[in-house]
Every structure is written in structure tokens, then in C-alpha cells.
Amino acid sequence: MGQENSDSVELSQVKIDSGMAIRSHKFSCSSTCPFSEHGYSQSDSAQRKKAATKLCGLIVCYLIVMVIEIVGGLKANSLAILTDAAHLLSDIAGFSISLFTVWVSGWTATPEHSFGYHRVEVIGALLSVQLIWVMSVSLIYEAIKRLITKQTEVNGRLMFVIAAFSLVINVILVLWLGHDHAHHGHSHHGHSHHDHDHSHHNCKDEGHNHEEEESRTGDEESTNLVSTPHGSSHMLNINIRGAYLHIICDCIQSVAAMVAGVFIWIKPKWLVADLICTLLFTTFALTTTFTIIRDIIHLLMERAPADIDAARLENGLKLITGVRHVHDLHIWAITSGKHVLSCHVVIGADVSPQGILQEIREYCELTYKISHVTIQIEQE
């Protein structure tokens, strides 16, 4: 049982220049893979549970407010209020998608999906933003149509009351989500929490013949890649970030609807205020999605995370004593806050691969919060 819980990381092949004999080493370390091991899943499960609780609360609150706005908007004949109700409907659909993706992201990794299902969160956030686009374009069309054809009377007082009620609910939701948002923000910086003892750095170097092949189910498996990840990054879930964006947009729309309601309440003929409010808000809602869409595209394109300077990281690796050269460096994110790195490192003939691996792992994790590091050693 203890042997099964002890994770083995093995380096069985070391590349060399032509004309030199093959040197092989094997390392046994107790580091855990953050995409498959229990040390990661426990902390990540708590984060998913927290995100799911908040999303469920948002869905219930928004359903109540949406029903009130639909009834009130029809009675007041206010397109601005109906716009808010339609936007709430898209929010509810988006939150439901986000809730589903948070659940799916907790599924156990499989041989076919070795990184798990974390990327589903990104796809869910993308669908949620697209719903905003569809609803915004539809409402802009309706507003322009009313401006051309002239609309009937609008009840400014009722419009103001409903918008004020919606604003109060949205402010409460902002404060509810604002605590996490204040800690994590939009800069994608997080805190690393180590869920296991750092004694795994004490690796053992053992002799090993290149010709020997050990089975995966028996002893340690032979491979020329060394995966040395551990730790869990408690970043703000991208779906909660999207939900926060939705609520901020709703707050702004509620304020605009209140202002338009006051104008129509005082001057009943100023019906254009209702339509201008709709046009301004929907345009604003579209522009606020650009940042999160940019981040989603970067994730799907496997761009290096914005908070990691790839050139600086590479230079830092080269400064480690014994490292001669670094090439094929790749840095990407599976989802927000879950970074991955792989590279080839050329070291001197008299340098211990074990020591180099330990230094590289510590450098990447402590300096850049990269939880999953895979290094291939090439020894001169």
C-alpha cells in the first residue's frame, strides 16, 4: 500500500553527443501530478465546490429577479427592463453552463484525457460570453426598430421601481462574489499551496541499464521524461470571473434603467430615454466581454500565461549551476491558474541530473507557480 502511494519519477535515458556511451539514471521522488493525484484533487475539489455553491446561488437569485422584471417590464412597456430580463436569461443559461463545466472538470483523468477535463471550464466560459453577444445584438435590433416605428407610452415610475429592485439584488451579489474577486482579481496571480511534505526532494540515484524495460504495473516505468509537479494553484475559477462580469454589467444596466425611468416619470414624452438606455447598455455589454474573450483565446491557443515571462524564465534556468543550454521550452495553461512547463536541458558530463532536476523544479514552482514541470535531461 505504501509502495503504491509513493509516486515514482524515473529518468532512464539520457541523451548524449555522438561517440559517447549512454549514461542512464533512475530517480525515485514522491512528487505528485496535480492533474491526477489525491494531493491536488482534495484542494481543487474544495475550490470546485465553492464555485458550484456560488453559481447555484446566482441562478436562484437571477430566476427570481428575471420573473419580476418580465412581469414588470411588460406592464411598464419598458424595453430597457425587458432588456435586463433578457440579459438575466442569458446569464442564467451561462451560469448553468458554468455549473456543468465546474462539475465536469472534477472528473478523474483518463489515459485519453491525461490532463483531466479542466479545459471544459474554458469552453463553458466561451459559450457564456457568446450568449451575451447574441442577446445584445437582438436587443439593439429591437431598440432601433422601436425608434423607427415609434413606441407606445412607458410607465416611468414602475420602470424606476423595478430597476431599483434589480440594482439592490445585484449589489448584494457583487458583495457576495467580491471577496474572492478582490483576492484574485483579473491579473491571474494566485497563491501556491503545498498539500504534501517537501521531503520528496530527497531523491535517490540508482544505476539502471538502458536495455531493461520495467512494466507499468510492476516496478517503476522506464521513460526519458521526468515529470516533477506538485502544489495546487488556488486561482479564481474562470467561470466565477465570468459571473462577476455578468453582475457588474447588470448593475450598470440597472442604474441606466433607473435614470431613464426618472426621466420618463418626470417627462412622459421622453420615451426615447428608454431606447437610448437599451442601446448604450448593450453596446457596453459587448465591449466588456473583449478582455475575457482574449484570455479564453490565449488559453485555447496554448499561449504562455500572461503572468509568466518565458524569456526571463529561460534565462533563469540557464543561470542554474551545471546547466549548459535550454531548448524546446514550452509553457502553457490547461485552464486559468493551472500552468504546465516542459523543456530539454543540457547539462555537463560531471553534473548530477538529480540535483539539476530538484533545482529546476523548485525554481519553476517557487518563482512562477508552475505546478506541472516535465524535464528531459541531455548530458554531455
Image: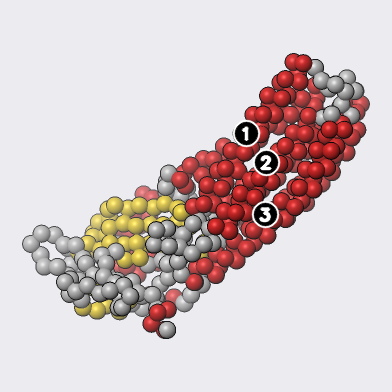
Decide if residue 256 is in sight here: no
Residue at image position (36%, 78%) is 202
Which secondary structure lies at badge 2? helix
- Say what amino acid the circle numbered 2 marks: Ser
| Distance between mark 3 and mark 1 Cα atoms | 22 Å
Above/below status of 140 relative to 235:
above
Disc with the residue nearer the chain's start (3 vs 2): 3
Q: Secondary structure at mark 1?
A: helix
Q: Quadrant of the C terminus?
A: bottom left
Measure the alpha-carbon separation of dots 3 and 2.
14 Å
Q: Is residue 145 visible?
A: yes
Q: Residues within 10 Å of mark 3 (few under 14, many from 20)?
A: many
Point out the tag, 3 or 1, that comes first from the N-terminus. 3
At label 1, the amino acid type is: Val
User: Which is more toward the observer, 197 or 350?
Assistant: 197
| Percent x, y of residue 324 | 23, 59
Above or below, 73 against 199 in this view is above
The residue that label 2 is drawn on is 90
| Coordinates of residue 86 in the picture (x, y in percent) | 72, 37
Q: Position of residue 30 (x, y in %)?
A: 39, 76
- Horizontal placement of 314 versus 18: left or right? right
User: Which residue position is annotated with label 1?
Assistant: 134
What residue is at 57 percent from the left and 37 percent from the top?
290
Identify the mark nearer the N-term, 1 or 2.
2
Q: What whole-number distance in Å separates the C-alpha atoms at marks 1 and 2?
A: 9 Å
The image shows residue 258 at horizontal and vertical percentages of 83, 35
Label disc, if present, on residue 55 of the rendered structure: 3
Asked whether the residues under the numbered discs 1 and 2 touch, taking CB atoms below 8 Å apart as contact, a structural biologist would say yes
Q: Amino acid at mark 3?
A: Leu
Residues marked 3 and 1 touching at CB (< 8 Å)? no
